[in-house]
């Protein structure tokens, strides 16, 4: 990163507001959507978004294009006569990509399956635990503020720190082994290493889902539950038929963000179990490892493949499940309907938060 | 940074940014002349920089201040890099790949010389200008690539065998073991003592990381084998190398090495030794002063590493200084290196930073030996030391060693199979 500091610092200011939320884009987008908008206001809109687009080009598009280009180059060769490495990287076309189906592919596919496995398992567990946490945090009881705060602590701890923390717990004579009364060498290769990563990851990120779901829960009106109770619906039935469908938009966004994050997982397995451990090596770790061994071509190819994978997963989410991530641009009537319905019930919810 | 900002960015940006961190380290390549060795000219005088790991003792700055006082027009600025070794290497490579002149003099880990020299990131140095003949020979060897000098030794390091002298004495073992068999025999005697209940015999660094490469190489070298020969050709599928690896594998099987040692890095091993779980431990000299302040203070001593039939061979650690190919004011850089690695500076580094010096005579200095009782042992260790495989792609070589050695120690592979696979992996790497 340091090599690109100048454009980034320059980018900081304009990106900040645009990145933080969709708010600045908010007023622009609906106007663009309106058929009655004049050409003048359209130009104005273009002018207003252009700094953002410029910044995105510099910090997002350019590096991505560079990565694509880099991934077409191979590894610098060693001249056996002089003992020196050549200055230029040979152009190899798509060979870096083709190599994943060849001899060097074992490590890639291992990393690919590890990444997928971690994503599916951790996000699955996080969803269940996160929803449970949200339900607990939502309940009115004494010391709720304390419970809420304590549930959120793991999310506040930087991953690098929690990686070290869990490494200490999973040490050969650590707390984990003391609790189960049996010595498991967690940080060696094997299923136990995977379990260690999953436990630490779920511990850290379930609160994130809990937080977003809690926000979703608070906009559900009390009267809906009252009506359900009047009709004699059991709590389980209420959960499946009221809570879950109404909280679904928030939940889907939370799950999507977690998926994207989990697919890029790097620091936790790296710190907890270690680099180059086959059982926990993810695609990010593989790409980093290749780059640190001065093989930028293959590293870029792996990074591009990871990018495509993440992109497809996100696209699948948005298309199949209708997770509304980008913001309210009225993609479907159904969606905007649901939004307005939620907005209507938001008022009592907001009152409830302050109590 | 990535995780935080992307979460809030619009969807597409999130996805693109995922690749951003990884791509940012992409190389900038341009097509200048390739293959031809650069003729080092060492011209130009003026301010330069010295890039090295963060120095907590402050002694590096002190030595640099000494230079700056004498050379006000050729001031040296100390650029502090992260203390993580991999990050240091990463930053230096980045600096070289962008052909930046930000770093003039580089402090290189002893195993990086080949890689940096082969990439022409550092200049060949005039050997006649440095007192290399006063330095320990194995240390000087780490500064050469294809018989040419590319760096000057600044500090050295070698493995030591720490042992519980109190328990050995009680069990009637008078001298530190020089062979593995003697060490196991000593353990057998010590373990009969009531105070040695629950103790294990031996440990080193066996987690899958650079430390395993060190320990594996030491085992192989101490059994008379080599990982790579003098020309860098892998030669690891040999009976001698197998004896070395078998010592580690069998020790894990029969409990000479405790099972959990497979998770040990330097610190875990030190903790285990200090809390009285180990009779013998292989570790670096840095541990000496720390153990002096622990529960085992006064109850331990250090000896050279044992081997199969006699004294074993340590793997060399240490740091060398080199001149970046892309730097300015190389004449100053050369003079500074001469000053930075001279006898006086080495003495200062030893006295105030407890860094093992490259100069042979310092190890016999009576005053210093009183302060650092392990110095004579360390000298023996370094003189018997073998550099780690010298390879241009050292990172890959080390990964291959870790992969196979770890599989053998874990019992996933027989040691014969592991060595056969390692030979094959290393052969492919050296053919590249």
Image (cartoon, coloured by chain):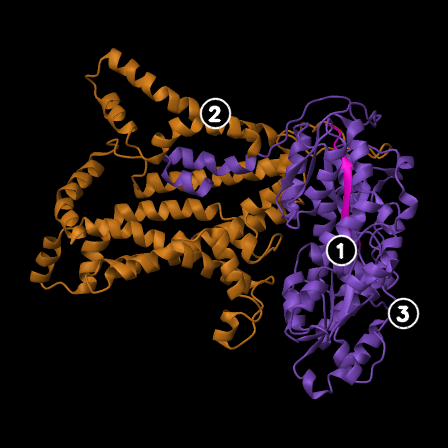
Chain colours: A orange, B purple
Badge 3: how crowded within 10 Å, few (<14), some, or many (20+)? some
Label whose residue precedes the other's in the sequence (3 or 1):
3
Nearer to us of marks 3 and 1 is: 3
Horizontal side of A221 relative to B376 (left or right) equals: left
Q: How many marks?
A: 3
Q: Which residues are magenta?
A: B316-327
User: Disc 3, disc 1: CB below 8 Å?
Assistant: no
Residue B35 sits above or below residue B131 on the image: above
Q: Which mark is residue A285?
A: none
Give x and y (percent) for residue B167.
Answer: 75, 81
Give x and y (percent) for residue B348.
Answer: 77, 49
Whether residue A156 is visible to the viewer of this picture, yes or no, is yes
In space, the residues marked 3 and 1 are separated at their CA atoms by 26 Å
Q: Which mark is residue B309?
A: 3
Residue designated by label 1: B421
Residue A246 sits above or below residue A165 on the image: above
* Location of residue A210 by image quarter: bottom left
Of all residues, the one furthest to the left in this rendering is A230
| The one of A42 and A227 positioned closer to us in this rendering | A42
Residue B323 in magenta stretch:
yes
Q: Which mark is residue A58?
A: 2
> Which residue is depicted at the point 67% across and 71% down?
B273
Please report, as a chain letter, where disc 2 is located: A
Please report, as a chain letter, where disc 3 is located: B
> Which residue is depicted at the point 23% across and 32% down?
A330
Give x and y (percent) for residue B411.
Answer: 69, 67
């Amino acid at each position: 990163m340091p090599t690109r500091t100048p454009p980034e610092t320059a980018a900081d200011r304009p990106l900040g507001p645009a990145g933080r939320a969709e708010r600045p884009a908010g007023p622009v987008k609906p106007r663009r959507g309106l058929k009655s908008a004049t050409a003048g206001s359209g130009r104005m809109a273009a002018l207003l978004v252009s700094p953002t687009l410029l910044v995105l080009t510099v910090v997002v598009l350019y590096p991505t294009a560079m990565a694509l280009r880099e991934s077409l180059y191979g590894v610098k060769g060693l001249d056996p006569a002089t003992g020196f490495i050549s200055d230029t990287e040979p152009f190899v076309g798509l060979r870096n990509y083709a190599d994943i189906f060849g001899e060097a592919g074992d490590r890639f596919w291992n990393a690919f399956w590890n990444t997928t496995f971690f994503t599916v398992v951790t996000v699955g567990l996080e969803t269940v635990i996160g929803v449970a946490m949200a339900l607990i945090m939502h309940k009115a009881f004494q010391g709720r503020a304390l419970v809420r705060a304590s549930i959120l602590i793991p999310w506040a701890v930087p991953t690098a720190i929690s990686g070290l923390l869990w490494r200490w717990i999973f040490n050969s004579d650590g707390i984990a082994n003391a609790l189960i009364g049996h010595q498991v060498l967690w940080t060696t290769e094997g299923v136990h290493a995977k379990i260690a990563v999953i436990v630490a990851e779920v511990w850290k990120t379930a609160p994130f889902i809990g937080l977003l779901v809690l926000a979703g829960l608070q906009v559900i009106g009390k009267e809906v539950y009252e009506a359900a109770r009047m009709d004699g619906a059991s709590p389980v039935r209420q959960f499946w038929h009221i809570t879950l469908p109404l909280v679904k938009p928030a939940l889907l966004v939370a799950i999507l963000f977690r998926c994207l994050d989990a697919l890029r997982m790097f620091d936790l397995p790296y710190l907890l179990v270690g680099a180059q451990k086959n059982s926990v090596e993810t695609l990010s770790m593989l790409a980093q490892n290749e780059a640190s061994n001065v093989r930028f071509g293959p590293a870029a190819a792996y990074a591009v493949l990871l990018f495509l994978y993440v992109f497809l997963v996100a696209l699948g989410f948005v298309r199949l499940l209708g997770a509304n991530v980008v913001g309210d641009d009225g993609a479907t009537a159904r969606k905007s309907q649901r939004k307005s319905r939620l907005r209507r019930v938001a008022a009592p919810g907001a009152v409830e938060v302050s109590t | 940074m990535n995780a935080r900002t992307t979460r809030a960015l619009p969807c597409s940006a999130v996805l693109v940014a995922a690749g951003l961190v990884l791509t940012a380290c992409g190389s900038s390549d341009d097509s200048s002349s390739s293959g031809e060795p650069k003729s080092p000219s060492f011209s130009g005088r003026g301010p330069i920089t010295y890039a090295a790991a963060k120095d907590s003792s402050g002694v590096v700055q002190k030595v640099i201040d000494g230079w700056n006082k004498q050379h006000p027009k050729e001031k040296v600025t100390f650029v502090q890099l992260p203390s993580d070794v991999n990050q240091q290497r990463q930053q230096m490579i980045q600096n070289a790949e962008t052909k930046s002149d930000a770093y003039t003099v580089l402090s290189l880990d002893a195993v990086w010389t080949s890689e940096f020299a082969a990439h022409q990131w550092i200049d060949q140095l005039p050997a006649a200008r440095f007192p290399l003949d006063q330095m320990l020979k194995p240390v000087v060897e780490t500064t050469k690539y294809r018989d040419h000098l590319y760096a000057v030794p600044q500090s050295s390091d070698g493995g030591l065998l720490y042992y519980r002298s109190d328990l050995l004495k009680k069990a009637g073992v008078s001298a530190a073991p020089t062979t593995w068999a003697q060490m196991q025999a000593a353990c057998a005697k010590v373990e009969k003592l009531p105070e040695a209940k629950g103790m294990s015999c031996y440990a080193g660094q066996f987690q899958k990381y650079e430390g395993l490469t060190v320990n594996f190489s030491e085992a192989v070298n101490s059994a008379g084998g080599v990982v790579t020969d003098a020309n860098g050709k892998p030669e690891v599928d040999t009976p001698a190398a197998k004896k070395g690896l078998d010592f580690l594998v069998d020790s894990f099987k029969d409990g000479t090495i405790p099972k959990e040692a497979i998770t040990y890095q330097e610190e875990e091993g030190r903790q285990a030794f200090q809390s009285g779980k180990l009779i013998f431990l292989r570790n670096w000299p840095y541990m000496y002063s720390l153990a002096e302040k622990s529960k085992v203070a006064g109850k331990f001593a250090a000896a050279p590493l044992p081997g199969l039939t006699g004294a074993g061979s340590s793997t060399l650690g240490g740091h060398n200084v080199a001149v970046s190919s892309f730097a300015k004011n190389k004449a100053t850089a050369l003079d500074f290196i001469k000053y930075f690695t001279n006898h006086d500076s080495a003495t200062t580094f030893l006295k105030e930073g407890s860094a093992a010096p490259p100069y042979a005579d310092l190890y016999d200095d009576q005053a210093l030996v009183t302060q650092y009782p392990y110095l004579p042992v360390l000298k023996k260790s370094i003189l018997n030391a073998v550099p780690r495989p010298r390879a241009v792609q050292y990172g890959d070589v080390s990964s291959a060693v870790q992969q196979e050695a770890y599989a053998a120690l874990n019992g996933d592979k027989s040691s014969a199979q592991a060595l056969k696979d390692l030979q094959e992996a290393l052969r492919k790497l050296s053919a590249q």
